[in-house]
Amino acid sequence: MRYVLDAASMKNVDSYSINTLGIPSVVLMERAALSVTEAIESKVKGNIHTDIICVCGRGNNGADGLAVARQLYLKGYNVDVYIINSHASTKEFDIQLNIIKNLGIECINSPDFSKYGVIVDALFGNGLSRELAGEARIVVDTINKCSTSVHSQYTQNSDNNGNRLVVAVDIPSGISASTGVVMGSAVNADITVTFGFEKIGHILYPAASYCGKIIRKDIGFAQYPDMTRDIFTYDYSDISDMLPLRKPDGNKGTFGKALVIAGSRLYGGAAVLSSRAAARIGAGLVRTLTHISNRTAVITGNMECIVDTYDTDEECGDFVKNTETLVDKCICWADVVCIGPGLSMEESAVKLVRSVSAKKNIKKLYDADALNIIAQYKIELDGSNDDVDYEAGGNSGNASYKDDMSDKNVVVTPHIGEMSRLTGLDIAVIKNNPIDTARTYSREHNCVCVLKDARTIVSDGERVYINMSGNDGMATGGSGDVLSGIITGLMAQGLTTFEASALGVYIHGCAGDEAALSNGKYSMVAGDIIDNIKNVLIKARGE
Protein backbone atom coordinates (compact mmCIF):
# COMPACT_ATOMS: atom_id res chain seq x y z
CA MET A 1 0.00 0.00 0.00
CA ARG A 2 1.29 3.43 -0.96
CA TYR A 3 -0.12 6.61 0.50
CA VAL A 4 -1.05 9.37 -1.93
CA LEU A 5 -1.02 12.98 -0.76
CA ASP A 6 -2.52 16.26 -1.88
CA ALA A 7 -0.61 19.56 -1.84
CA ALA A 8 -1.65 20.51 1.70
CA SER A 9 -0.68 17.14 3.17
CA MET A 10 2.70 17.21 1.42
CA LYS A 11 3.31 20.71 2.77
CA ASN A 12 2.63 19.38 6.28
CA VAL A 13 5.09 16.52 5.76
CA ASP A 14 7.70 19.01 4.63
CA SER A 15 7.03 21.34 7.57
CA TYR A 16 7.12 18.49 10.12
CA SER A 17 10.43 17.22 8.79
CA ILE A 18 12.04 20.67 8.80
CA ASN A 19 10.43 22.56 11.69
CA THR A 20 9.62 19.77 14.15
CA LEU A 21 12.40 17.26 13.56
CA GLY A 22 15.00 19.83 12.60
CA ILE A 23 16.09 18.38 9.26
CA PRO A 24 17.60 21.37 7.40
CA SER A 25 15.66 22.25 4.26
CA VAL A 26 18.91 22.46 2.29
CA VAL A 27 19.65 18.84 3.19
CA LEU A 28 16.30 17.69 1.80
CA MET A 29 16.84 19.90 -1.22
CA GLU A 30 20.28 18.44 -1.91
CA ARG A 31 18.94 14.90 -1.77
CA ALA A 32 16.05 15.85 -4.03
CA ALA A 33 18.43 17.37 -6.56
CA LEU A 34 20.69 14.32 -6.44
CA SER A 35 17.66 12.15 -7.32
CA VAL A 36 16.93 14.29 -10.38
CA THR A 37 20.59 14.37 -11.41
CA GLU A 38 20.78 10.60 -11.13
CA ALA A 39 17.69 10.20 -13.35
CA ILE A 40 19.16 12.50 -16.01
CA GLU A 41 22.54 10.76 -16.00
CA SER A 42 20.87 7.37 -16.40
CA LYS A 43 19.38 8.61 -19.67
CA VAL A 44 22.26 10.59 -21.20
CA LYS A 45 24.71 7.85 -20.20
CA GLY A 46 27.52 10.15 -19.21
CA ASN A 47 27.51 12.14 -22.44
CA ILE A 48 28.88 15.34 -20.92
CA HIS A 49 28.51 17.13 -24.25
CA THR A 50 24.74 17.10 -23.77
CA ASP A 51 23.43 20.66 -23.48
CA ILE A 52 21.15 21.00 -20.47
CA ILE A 53 18.96 23.87 -19.35
CA CYS A 54 17.25 24.13 -15.95
CA VAL A 55 14.11 26.28 -16.17
CA CYS A 56 13.36 27.61 -12.71
CA GLY A 57 10.75 29.56 -10.85
CA ARG A 58 11.69 31.50 -7.72
CA GLY A 59 10.17 29.14 -5.17
CA ASN A 60 11.62 26.02 -3.60
CA ASN A 61 10.89 23.99 -6.73
CA GLY A 62 13.09 26.46 -8.59
CA ALA A 63 15.70 26.11 -5.85
CA ASP A 64 15.70 22.35 -6.50
CA GLY A 65 16.31 23.14 -10.17
CA LEU A 66 19.27 25.36 -9.35
CA ALA A 67 20.77 22.61 -7.19
CA VAL A 68 20.37 20.18 -10.12
CA ALA A 69 22.14 22.68 -12.39
CA ARG A 70 25.04 22.94 -9.93
CA GLN A 71 25.41 19.16 -9.57
CA LEU A 72 25.38 18.57 -13.31
CA TYR A 73 27.81 21.44 -13.91
CA LEU A 74 30.25 20.01 -11.39
CA LYS A 75 30.06 16.69 -13.23
CA GLY A 76 31.19 18.42 -16.43
CA TYR A 77 27.92 18.92 -18.30
CA ASN A 78 27.10 22.03 -20.30
CA VAL A 79 24.44 23.66 -18.14
CA ASP A 80 22.48 26.89 -18.50
CA VAL A 81 19.83 28.31 -16.18
CA TYR A 82 16.74 30.28 -17.08
CA ILE A 83 14.78 31.97 -14.27
CA ILE A 84 11.33 33.44 -14.77
CA ASN A 85 10.25 36.51 -12.83
CA SER A 86 7.11 35.03 -11.34
CA HIS A 87 7.16 36.22 -7.73
CA ALA A 88 9.43 37.01 -4.82
CA SER A 89 12.09 34.38 -4.20
CA THR A 90 12.32 32.07 -1.18
CA LYS A 91 15.30 31.93 1.17
CA GLU A 92 16.33 28.54 -0.21
CA PHE A 93 16.19 29.86 -3.76
CA ASP A 94 18.48 32.77 -2.89
CA ILE A 95 20.99 30.37 -1.29
CA GLN A 96 21.09 28.15 -4.39
CA LEU A 97 21.24 31.12 -6.76
CA ASN A 98 24.24 32.55 -4.93
CA ILE A 99 26.07 29.23 -5.25
CA ILE A 100 25.57 28.90 -9.00
CA LYS A 101 26.63 32.51 -9.53
CA ASN A 102 29.83 31.82 -7.58
CA LEU A 103 30.46 28.81 -9.81
CA GLY A 104 29.98 30.88 -12.93
CA ILE A 105 26.95 28.99 -14.24
CA GLU A 106 25.28 31.21 -16.82
CA CYS A 107 21.76 32.55 -16.22
CA ILE A 108 20.43 33.43 -19.66
CA ASN A 109 17.53 35.71 -20.55
CA SER A 110 16.17 34.46 -23.88
CA PRO A 111 16.92 30.77 -24.29
CA ASP A 112 16.46 28.84 -27.51
CA PHE A 113 15.03 25.65 -25.99
CA SER A 114 15.45 23.78 -29.26
CA LYS A 115 19.25 23.68 -28.80
CA TYR A 116 19.12 21.69 -25.56
CA GLY A 117 19.14 17.92 -25.28
CA VAL A 118 17.72 18.00 -21.73
CA ILE A 119 15.22 20.47 -20.30
CA VAL A 120 14.70 20.40 -16.52
CA ASP A 121 11.30 21.75 -15.50
CA ALA A 122 11.58 23.40 -12.07
CA LEU A 123 9.09 26.22 -12.53
CA PHE A 124 6.32 25.29 -10.11
CA GLY A 125 5.93 22.48 -7.59
CA ASN A 126 3.06 21.14 -5.51
CA GLY A 127 1.89 24.53 -4.34
CA LEU A 128 0.53 25.76 -7.68
CA SER A 129 -3.05 26.95 -7.16
CA ARG A 130 -3.73 29.23 -10.12
CA GLU A 131 -3.75 28.90 -13.89
CA LEU A 132 -0.51 29.58 -15.70
CA ALA A 133 -0.36 32.98 -17.30
CA GLY A 134 2.10 35.49 -18.70
CA GLU A 135 5.73 34.47 -18.99
CA ALA A 136 5.19 31.12 -17.27
CA ARG A 137 2.52 30.07 -19.76
CA ILE A 138 4.66 31.16 -22.70
CA VAL A 139 7.66 29.21 -21.38
CA VAL A 140 5.65 26.04 -20.79
CA ASP A 141 4.08 26.17 -24.24
CA THR A 142 7.49 26.80 -25.82
CA ILE A 143 9.03 23.81 -24.04
CA ASN A 144 6.20 21.61 -25.28
CA LYS A 145 6.58 22.83 -28.87
CA CYS A 146 10.29 22.00 -28.76
CA SER A 147 9.69 18.41 -27.70
CA THR A 148 9.48 15.96 -30.58
CA SER A 149 6.76 14.03 -28.75
CA VAL A 150 4.92 14.03 -25.46
CA HIS A 151 7.00 11.07 -24.31
CA SER A 152 10.23 10.78 -26.26
CA GLN A 153 12.26 7.68 -26.83
CA TYR A 154 14.31 8.56 -23.77
CA THR A 155 11.52 6.90 -21.81
CA GLN A 156 11.73 3.80 -24.00
CA ASN A 157 15.49 3.32 -24.11
CA SER A 158 18.68 5.04 -23.15
CA ASP A 159 19.72 6.23 -26.60
CA ASN A 160 19.35 9.84 -27.69
CA ASN A 161 17.81 9.17 -31.12
CA GLY A 162 17.57 12.92 -31.65
CA ASN A 163 14.87 13.33 -29.03
CA ARG A 164 14.78 15.92 -26.31
CA LEU A 165 14.47 14.75 -22.71
CA VAL A 166 12.14 16.76 -20.47
CA VAL A 167 12.49 16.05 -16.75
CA ALA A 168 10.02 17.49 -14.24
CA VAL A 169 11.15 18.19 -10.69
CA ASP A 170 8.49 16.76 -8.31
CA ILE A 171 5.52 17.45 -10.63
CA PRO A 172 5.16 18.92 -14.13
CA SER A 173 4.60 22.67 -13.95
CA GLY A 174 0.95 23.50 -14.57
CA ILE A 175 -0.47 20.44 -12.80
CA SER A 176 -2.59 20.71 -9.66
CA ALA A 177 -1.03 18.30 -7.18
CA SER A 178 -4.36 18.02 -5.33
CA THR A 179 -6.74 17.33 -8.20
CA GLY A 180 -4.82 16.31 -11.32
CA VAL A 181 -6.35 19.21 -13.24
CA VAL A 182 -4.24 21.00 -15.84
CA MET A 183 -4.05 24.65 -14.84
CA GLY A 184 -4.36 26.14 -18.32
CA SER A 185 -1.24 24.46 -19.68
CA ALA A 186 1.36 22.03 -18.35
CA VAL A 187 4.80 20.72 -19.21
CA ASN A 188 4.76 17.41 -21.08
CA ALA A 189 7.47 15.55 -19.21
CA ASP A 190 9.21 12.35 -20.19
CA ILE A 191 10.23 11.70 -16.59
CA THR A 192 8.91 13.10 -13.32
CA VAL A 193 11.10 12.65 -10.26
CA THR A 194 8.99 13.08 -7.14
CA PHE A 195 9.98 13.01 -3.51
CA GLY A 196 8.64 11.09 -0.54
CA PHE A 197 5.09 10.39 -1.69
CA GLU A 198 3.14 10.30 -4.91
CA LYS A 199 0.64 13.13 -5.27
CA ILE A 200 -2.90 12.96 -6.55
CA GLY A 201 -1.75 15.02 -9.53
CA HIS A 202 0.66 12.27 -10.55
CA ILE A 203 -2.08 9.67 -10.70
CA LEU A 204 -5.37 11.17 -11.89
CA TYR A 205 -6.02 12.04 -15.50
CA PRO A 206 -5.53 14.26 -17.38
CA ALA A 207 -2.43 15.12 -15.33
CA ALA A 208 -1.09 11.57 -15.38
CA SER A 209 -0.53 11.80 -19.13
CA TYR A 210 1.84 14.75 -18.58
CA CYS A 211 4.10 13.01 -16.06
CA GLY A 212 5.75 10.39 -18.24
CA LYS A 213 7.62 7.84 -16.17
CA ILE A 214 7.28 8.61 -12.46
CA ILE A 215 10.33 7.98 -10.27
CA ARG A 216 9.59 8.25 -6.56
CA LYS A 217 12.60 8.87 -4.32
CA ASP A 218 12.98 8.81 -0.54
CA ILE A 219 14.89 11.97 0.38
CA GLY A 220 14.39 11.76 4.14
CA PHE A 221 10.87 13.04 4.76
CA ALA A 222 9.28 11.75 7.97
CA GLN A 223 5.69 10.60 8.37
CA TYR A 224 4.25 12.77 11.10
CA PRO A 225 1.77 11.25 13.59
CA ASP A 226 -1.31 12.98 12.16
CA MET A 227 -0.36 12.56 8.51
CA THR A 228 -3.32 11.93 6.22
CA ARG A 229 -3.42 8.23 5.34
CA ASP A 230 -6.91 8.00 3.91
CA ILE A 231 -5.91 8.13 0.22
CA PHE A 232 -3.82 5.26 -1.10
CA THR A 233 -3.12 2.87 -3.92
CA TYR A 234 -2.01 -0.76 -4.07
CA ASP A 235 1.05 -2.68 -5.21
CA TYR A 236 1.06 -6.28 -6.41
CA SER A 237 2.35 -7.39 -3.02
CA ASP A 238 -0.87 -6.19 -1.36
CA ILE A 239 -2.98 -8.86 -3.06
CA SER A 240 -1.71 -11.79 -0.99
CA ASP A 241 -1.98 -9.78 2.22
CA MET A 242 -5.61 -8.90 1.59
CA LEU A 243 -7.08 -12.01 0.01
CA PRO A 244 -9.42 -13.92 2.33
CA LEU A 245 -7.77 -16.94 3.90
CA ARG A 246 -8.78 -20.35 2.56
CA LYS A 247 -9.48 -22.75 5.40
CA PRO A 248 -8.00 -26.20 4.76
CA ASP A 249 -11.13 -27.86 6.15
CA GLY A 250 -13.55 -25.47 4.43
CA ASN A 251 -16.38 -26.42 2.10
CA LYS A 252 -18.26 -24.55 -0.61
CA GLY A 253 -20.51 -22.94 1.98
CA THR A 254 -17.47 -21.71 3.89
CA PHE A 255 -16.39 -19.54 0.98
CA GLY A 256 -19.69 -17.78 0.53
CA LYS A 257 -22.83 -17.81 -1.60
CA ALA A 258 -23.14 -15.13 -4.26
CA LEU A 259 -26.35 -14.32 -6.14
CA VAL A 260 -26.02 -12.55 -9.48
CA ILE A 261 -29.23 -11.03 -10.86
CA ALA A 262 -28.26 -10.14 -14.38
CA GLY A 263 -29.19 -10.37 -18.04
CA SER A 264 -32.43 -9.77 -19.90
CA ARG A 265 -34.10 -10.78 -23.14
CA LEU A 266 -31.62 -8.76 -25.19
CA TYR A 267 -28.52 -8.86 -22.99
CA GLY A 268 -27.59 -12.37 -21.94
CA GLY A 269 -23.80 -12.16 -21.94
CA ALA A 270 -23.60 -9.96 -18.84
CA ALA A 271 -25.08 -12.74 -16.71
CA VAL A 272 -22.40 -15.15 -17.92
CA LEU A 273 -19.51 -12.73 -17.37
CA SER A 274 -20.54 -11.61 -13.87
CA SER A 275 -21.24 -15.11 -12.59
CA ARG A 276 -18.02 -16.52 -14.08
CA ALA A 277 -15.96 -13.77 -12.49
CA ALA A 278 -17.55 -14.33 -9.07
CA ALA A 279 -16.72 -18.02 -9.27
CA ARG A 280 -13.20 -17.50 -10.60
CA ILE A 281 -12.28 -15.13 -7.75
CA GLY A 282 -13.12 -17.86 -5.24
CA ALA A 283 -16.79 -17.68 -4.19
CA GLY A 284 -17.93 -21.08 -2.96
CA LEU A 285 -21.30 -21.05 -4.69
CA VAL A 286 -22.63 -18.76 -7.40
CA ARG A 287 -26.30 -18.58 -8.31
CA THR A 288 -27.63 -16.62 -11.28
CA LEU A 289 -31.18 -15.30 -11.60
CA THR A 290 -31.76 -14.32 -15.21
CA HIS A 291 -34.27 -14.19 -18.04
CA ILE A 292 -35.29 -17.63 -19.30
CA SER A 293 -33.82 -16.88 -22.73
CA ASN A 294 -30.36 -16.86 -21.13
CA ARG A 295 -30.58 -20.20 -19.36
CA THR A 296 -28.62 -22.21 -21.93
CA ALA A 297 -25.98 -19.50 -22.33
CA VAL A 298 -25.36 -19.23 -18.59
CA ILE A 299 -25.17 -22.98 -18.05
CA THR A 300 -22.87 -23.38 -21.06
CA GLY A 301 -20.69 -20.38 -20.18
CA ASN A 302 -20.47 -21.14 -16.47
CA MET A 303 -21.47 -24.73 -15.84
CA GLU A 304 -20.56 -24.47 -12.13
CA CYS A 305 -23.31 -21.89 -11.63
CA ILE A 306 -26.77 -22.58 -10.20
CA VAL A 307 -29.36 -21.06 -12.55
CA ASP A 308 -32.88 -19.76 -11.83
CA THR A 309 -34.96 -18.05 -14.50
CA TYR A 310 -38.00 -15.86 -14.98
CA ASP A 311 -40.01 -14.99 -18.08
CA THR A 312 -41.39 -11.65 -19.25
CA ASP A 313 -44.08 -10.40 -21.59
CA GLU A 314 -42.49 -9.16 -24.82
CA GLU A 315 -44.99 -6.31 -25.10
CA CYS A 316 -44.89 -4.73 -21.63
CA GLY A 317 -41.65 -6.19 -20.26
CA ASP A 318 -43.31 -7.29 -17.03
CA PHE A 319 -43.10 -10.76 -15.50
CA VAL A 320 -45.33 -13.35 -17.16
CA LYS A 321 -46.25 -14.59 -13.71
CA ASN A 322 -45.58 -13.51 -10.16
CA THR A 323 -41.97 -14.29 -9.37
CA GLU A 324 -41.83 -12.68 -5.94
CA THR A 325 -41.47 -16.05 -4.20
CA LEU A 326 -38.59 -17.07 -6.49
CA VAL A 327 -36.77 -13.78 -6.06
CA ASP A 328 -37.21 -13.85 -2.30
CA LYS A 329 -35.93 -17.44 -2.15
CA CYS A 330 -32.81 -16.56 -4.14
CA ILE A 331 -32.02 -13.48 -2.05
CA CYS A 332 -32.53 -15.30 1.25
CA TRP A 333 -30.15 -18.03 0.05
CA ALA A 334 -27.31 -15.59 -0.64
CA ASP A 335 -24.62 -13.94 1.46
CA VAL A 336 -24.29 -11.17 -1.12
CA VAL A 337 -26.38 -10.01 -4.08
CA CYS A 338 -25.13 -8.42 -7.30
CA ILE A 339 -27.83 -6.84 -9.47
CA GLY A 340 -27.73 -4.87 -12.68
CA PRO A 341 -25.41 -6.18 -15.41
CA GLY A 342 -27.44 -6.40 -18.63
CA LEU A 343 -30.68 -6.11 -16.64
CA SER A 344 -32.46 -3.66 -19.00
CA MET A 345 -34.89 -0.94 -17.98
CA GLU A 346 -38.01 -3.08 -18.41
CA GLU A 347 -40.74 -3.27 -15.78
CA SER A 348 -39.46 -6.67 -14.62
CA ALA A 349 -36.02 -5.16 -14.00
CA VAL A 350 -37.53 -2.32 -11.96
CA LYS A 351 -39.35 -4.84 -9.79
CA LEU A 352 -36.15 -6.86 -9.28
CA VAL A 353 -34.25 -3.74 -8.14
CA ARG A 354 -37.07 -2.83 -5.75
CA SER A 355 -37.02 -6.37 -4.33
CA VAL A 356 -33.28 -6.23 -3.63
CA SER A 357 -33.51 -2.73 -2.18
CA ALA A 358 -36.22 -3.84 0.24
CA LYS A 359 -34.05 -6.58 1.75
CA LYS A 360 -32.09 -5.36 4.75
CA ASN A 361 -28.95 -6.71 6.38
CA ILE A 362 -27.49 -8.34 3.29
CA LYS A 363 -24.55 -7.12 1.27
CA LYS A 364 -25.57 -5.77 -2.12
CA LEU A 365 -23.86 -4.50 -5.23
CA TYR A 366 -25.75 -2.32 -7.72
CA ASP A 367 -24.31 -2.03 -11.22
CA ALA A 368 -25.23 -0.86 -14.70
CA ASP A 369 -29.01 -0.85 -15.33
CA ALA A 370 -29.76 -1.23 -11.63
CA LEU A 371 -28.09 2.16 -11.15
CA ASN A 372 -30.04 3.67 -14.04
CA ILE A 373 -33.27 2.38 -12.51
CA ILE A 374 -32.29 3.75 -9.09
CA ALA A 375 -31.60 7.14 -10.67
CA GLN A 376 -34.82 7.23 -12.68
CA TYR A 377 -37.18 5.95 -10.00
CA LYS A 378 -35.40 7.46 -6.97
CA ILE A 379 -35.10 4.08 -5.27
CA GLU A 380 -33.26 4.01 -1.95
CA LEU A 381 -30.14 1.86 -1.78
CA ASP A 382 -30.92 0.85 1.79
CA GLY A 383 -27.43 0.95 3.24
CA SER A 384 -28.49 -0.33 6.66
CA ASN A 385 -25.92 -2.57 8.34
CA ASP A 386 -27.87 -3.38 11.50
CA ASP A 387 -27.10 -6.80 12.93
CA VAL A 388 -24.56 -7.69 10.23
CA ASP A 389 -21.79 -9.72 11.84
CA TYR A 390 -18.61 -8.70 10.05
CA GLU A 391 -16.48 -10.61 12.57
CA ALA A 392 -17.83 -13.87 11.19
CA GLY A 393 -16.51 -13.70 7.65
CA GLY A 394 -13.07 -13.75 6.11
CA ASN A 395 -9.68 -12.59 7.19
CA SER A 396 -8.02 -9.99 5.06
CA GLY A 397 -4.72 -10.05 6.88
CA ASN A 398 -4.89 -6.24 7.10
CA ALA A 399 -5.45 -4.99 10.65
CA SER A 400 -6.65 -1.55 9.59
CA TYR A 401 -9.56 -3.21 7.82
CA LYS A 402 -10.24 -6.04 10.26
CA ASP A 403 -10.58 -3.60 13.13
CA ASP A 404 -13.00 -1.38 11.19
CA MET A 405 -16.55 -2.23 12.24
CA SER A 406 -18.21 0.65 10.38
CA ASP A 407 -18.51 -1.26 7.09
CA LYS A 408 -21.41 -0.35 4.83
CA ASN A 409 -23.39 -3.16 3.24
CA VAL A 410 -24.07 -1.57 -0.16
CA VAL A 411 -21.70 -1.09 -3.12
CA VAL A 412 -22.49 0.97 -6.22
CA THR A 413 -20.27 0.72 -9.30
CA PRO A 414 -21.17 3.58 -11.66
CA HIS A 415 -19.13 4.74 -14.61
CA ILE A 416 -18.97 8.49 -15.18
CA GLY A 417 -22.23 8.63 -17.18
CA GLU A 418 -24.15 6.61 -14.61
CA MET A 419 -22.70 8.79 -11.84
CA SER A 420 -24.02 11.82 -13.66
CA ARG A 421 -27.50 10.32 -13.71
CA LEU A 422 -27.29 9.36 -10.04
CA THR A 423 -26.09 12.76 -8.85
CA GLY A 424 -27.36 15.20 -11.45
CA LEU A 425 -23.81 16.54 -11.85
CA ASP A 426 -22.34 17.33 -15.25
CA ILE A 427 -19.86 14.78 -16.54
CA ALA A 428 -17.12 17.45 -16.71
CA VAL A 429 -17.64 18.27 -13.02
CA ILE A 430 -17.33 14.60 -12.05
CA LYS A 431 -14.21 14.05 -14.16
CA ASN A 432 -12.53 17.10 -12.63
CA ASN A 433 -13.45 16.05 -9.07
CA PRO A 434 -13.72 12.23 -8.97
CA ILE A 435 -12.47 11.86 -5.39
CA ASP A 436 -14.84 14.44 -3.93
CA THR A 437 -17.71 13.09 -6.03
CA ALA A 438 -17.23 9.50 -4.85
CA ARG A 439 -16.68 10.53 -1.23
CA THR A 440 -19.74 12.75 -1.13
CA TYR A 441 -22.03 10.16 -2.73
CA SER A 442 -20.81 7.49 -0.33
CA ARG A 443 -21.45 9.70 2.69
CA GLU A 444 -24.87 10.81 1.53
CA HIS A 445 -26.08 7.32 0.64
CA ASN A 446 -24.28 5.22 3.26
CA CYS A 447 -22.55 3.04 0.70
CA VAL A 448 -19.21 2.24 -0.89
CA CYS A 449 -18.88 4.02 -4.22
CA VAL A 450 -16.75 2.54 -7.01
CA LEU A 451 -16.50 5.37 -9.54
CA LYS A 452 -15.19 3.71 -12.69
CA ASP A 453 -12.89 5.53 -15.08
CA ALA A 454 -9.31 5.26 -16.34
CA ARG A 455 -8.38 5.81 -12.67
CA THR A 456 -11.19 4.17 -10.74
CA ILE A 457 -11.92 5.69 -7.34
CA VAL A 458 -13.26 3.62 -4.42
CA SER A 459 -14.55 5.43 -1.35
CA ASP A 460 -16.54 4.66 1.78
CA GLY A 461 -16.94 8.35 2.51
CA GLU A 462 -13.62 8.64 4.35
CA ARG A 463 -11.02 6.34 2.85
CA VAL A 464 -10.17 6.63 -0.83
CA TYR A 465 -8.48 4.01 -2.98
CA ILE A 466 -7.12 5.18 -6.36
CA ASN A 467 -6.56 2.34 -8.80
CA MET A 468 -3.47 2.30 -10.99
CA SER A 469 -3.74 -1.18 -12.52
CA GLY A 470 -5.34 -1.87 -15.88
CA ASN A 471 -5.05 -0.51 -19.42
CA ASP A 472 -7.07 0.85 -22.31
CA GLY A 473 -7.59 -2.63 -23.74
CA MET A 474 -10.13 -3.08 -20.97
CA ALA A 475 -12.35 -0.42 -22.54
CA THR A 476 -14.52 -3.13 -24.06
CA GLY A 477 -18.07 -4.35 -23.57
CA GLY A 478 -18.51 -6.58 -20.53
CA SER A 479 -15.45 -5.40 -18.61
CA GLY A 480 -17.64 -3.74 -15.99
CA ASP A 481 -19.72 -6.91 -15.63
CA VAL A 482 -16.53 -8.80 -14.82
CA LEU A 483 -15.61 -6.23 -12.16
CA SER A 484 -19.02 -6.56 -10.51
CA GLY A 485 -18.59 -10.31 -10.35
CA ILE A 486 -15.10 -10.05 -8.84
CA ILE A 487 -16.21 -7.65 -6.10
CA THR A 488 -19.28 -9.80 -5.38
CA GLY A 489 -17.16 -12.94 -5.10
CA LEU A 490 -14.78 -11.27 -2.65
CA MET A 491 -17.66 -10.00 -0.51
CA ALA A 492 -19.14 -13.50 -0.47
CA GLN A 493 -15.88 -14.75 1.04
CA GLY A 494 -16.20 -12.33 3.94
CA LEU A 495 -14.32 -9.20 2.95
CA THR A 496 -15.92 -5.91 3.90
CA THR A 497 -17.59 -3.98 1.12
CA PHE A 498 -14.82 -1.38 0.97
CA GLU A 499 -12.05 -3.94 1.10
CA ALA A 500 -13.67 -6.16 -1.53
CA SER A 501 -14.26 -3.17 -3.79
CA ALA A 502 -10.72 -1.78 -3.58
CA LEU A 503 -9.04 -5.17 -3.91
CA GLY A 504 -11.50 -6.25 -6.61
CA VAL A 505 -10.79 -3.18 -8.72
CA TYR A 506 -7.05 -3.75 -8.38
CA ILE A 507 -7.22 -7.46 -9.28
CA HIS A 508 -9.54 -6.65 -12.19
CA GLY A 509 -6.93 -4.24 -13.55
CA CYS A 510 -4.07 -6.68 -12.98
CA ALA A 511 -5.99 -9.40 -14.83
CA GLY A 512 -6.50 -6.91 -17.65
CA ASP A 513 -2.77 -6.24 -17.73
CA GLU A 514 -2.09 -9.97 -17.95
CA ALA A 515 -4.65 -10.26 -20.75
CA ALA A 516 -2.98 -7.41 -22.65
CA LEU A 517 0.33 -9.26 -22.54
CA SER A 518 -1.14 -12.43 -24.04
CA ASN A 519 -3.87 -11.03 -26.29
CA GLY A 520 -2.83 -7.46 -27.06
CA LYS A 521 -4.89 -4.41 -26.15
CA TYR A 522 -6.65 -4.26 -29.51
CA SER A 523 -7.84 -7.86 -29.37
CA MET A 524 -8.82 -8.11 -25.71
CA VAL A 525 -12.37 -9.01 -24.73
CA ALA A 526 -13.96 -9.16 -21.29
CA GLY A 527 -13.66 -12.94 -21.10
CA ASP A 528 -9.88 -12.60 -21.34
CA ILE A 529 -9.91 -10.66 -18.07
CA ILE A 530 -11.72 -13.53 -16.34
CA ASP A 531 -9.30 -16.06 -17.80
CA ASN A 532 -6.38 -14.17 -16.28
CA ILE A 533 -7.76 -13.79 -12.75
CA LYS A 534 -6.16 -17.12 -11.88
CA ASN A 535 -2.79 -16.00 -13.19
CA VAL A 536 -2.87 -12.88 -11.01
CA LEU A 537 -3.78 -14.85 -7.89
CA ILE A 538 -1.14 -17.51 -8.55
CA LYS A 539 1.58 -14.89 -9.01
CA ALA A 540 0.48 -12.87 -6.01
CA ARG A 541 0.45 -15.87 -3.69
CA GLY A 542 3.59 -17.42 -5.14
CA GLU A 543 1.82 -20.68 -5.89
Image (tube, rainbow, N blue to C red):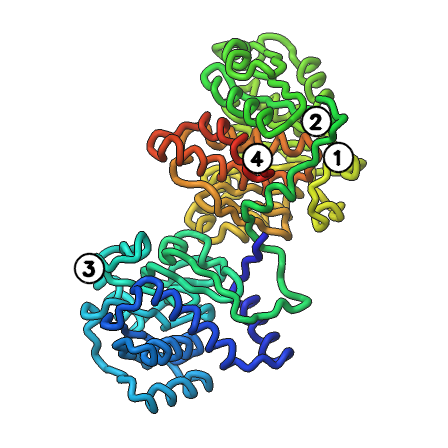
Judged from the image, the secondary structure of the residue bearing numbered disc 3 is: loop
Image quadrant assignment for residue 283: top right
Instruction: Name the residue carrying label 4.
Output: 537
Residue found at x 40% / y 84%: 96
Instruction: Give the mark nearer the N terminus: 1 vs 4.
Output: 1
Q: Which mark is residue 393?
A: 1
Instruction: Name the residue carrying label 3.
Output: 162
Q: Which of label 1 and label 4 is nearer to you? A: 4
Q: Which mark is residue 256?
A: 2
Residue 249's x, y, as percent? 76, 26
Type of residue at label 2? Gly
Vertical relation: 391 (above or below) 166? above
Left or right: 165 as drawn, with respect to 486: left
Instruction: Give the mark nearer the N terminus: 3 vs 2.
Output: 3
Residue 400's x, y, as percent? 70, 51
Left or right: 273 as drawn, with respect to 520: right
Cα–Cα span, label 4 and label 2: 18 Å
Q: Is residue 492 among what the camera can see?
A: yes
Instruction: Give the mark nearer the N terminus: 4 vs 3.
Output: 3
- Viewer-nearest residue: 441 or 66: 66
Q: Are marks 1 and 4 in contact (CB under 8 Å)?
A: no
Q: Mark 1 Cα within 10 Å, few/some/many (few <14, many 20+)?
A: some
- Viewer-nearest residue: 54 or 444: 54
Instruction: Give the mark nearer the N terminus: 4 vs 2.
Output: 2
Instruction: Give the mark nearer the N terminus: 1 vs 3.
Output: 3
